[in-house]
Image: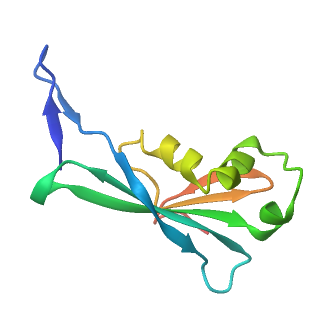
Amino acid sequence: MHWLRAAASATLIRMPWQIAGQVGTHAEPGTDASGWVWELQRGEGDTSEVRRVFVEVSGPALASSNLPSTRTMEAIKSEGRSEVERVAALDDPPRVIKCSTDGVRDVYPDDAQ
């Protein structure tokens, strides 16, 4: 794990995630959704951490021209980057971000589908 020692105190602070870039498009077999895989990184050299985040957009959201969810609309326009920027600020970003006509939901491994 990567930590920075705050100069003014003895508090340890985790290094923030940085967006390394978009890996490409992706679709899970058997779902009516597709999206983009992004890579986050924190730290440098041999001790760096890398995490991939899949921004998944439902088929109905992709087909809609008038989405009620502004966040889903922005995710589509930015090919997922708007949501990746949001979760990069978290200490434990989700592996999957599901965007639909209803809104956006972060999905963690222990979450029920």
77 or 42: nearer the viewer: 77
The residue nearer to you, when weighing 68 against 24, is 24
Is residue 104 visible to us here?
no
- Residue 14: x, y in percent? 24, 38
Q: Is residue 3 left or right of residue 98?
A: left
Name, please, the residue furthest toward the top: 8
Tell me the quadrant of the picture where the C terminus can be found: bottom right
Residue ID at (20%, 48%): 43
Q: Residue furthest bottom?
A: 30
Vertical side of 30 occupied by 34: above or below = above
85 or 96, which lies in front? 85
| Residue appearing at x 57%, y 74% in the figure | 26
Residue 12: name its quadrant.
top left
Q: Residue at x 49, y 43 (%)?
A: 85
In the picture shown, does residue 53 fall above or below 92?
Answer: below
- Judged left or right of residue 93, residue 112 is right
The number of numbered discs placed on residues in the rendered structure image is 0
Q: Residue 30: x and y, percent?
A: 67, 86
Tell me: residue 33, above or below residue 6.
below
- Which x, y percent locates residue 15? 24, 39
As drawn, is 61 to the left or to the right of 105?
Answer: right
- In the image, 62 versus 3, the foreground residue is 62
- Indicate the colouring scheme: rainbow
Quick check: can you spot residue 20? yes
Residue at point 63%, 53% (across, down): 105
Q: Position of residue 27 (x, y in %)?
A: 61, 77
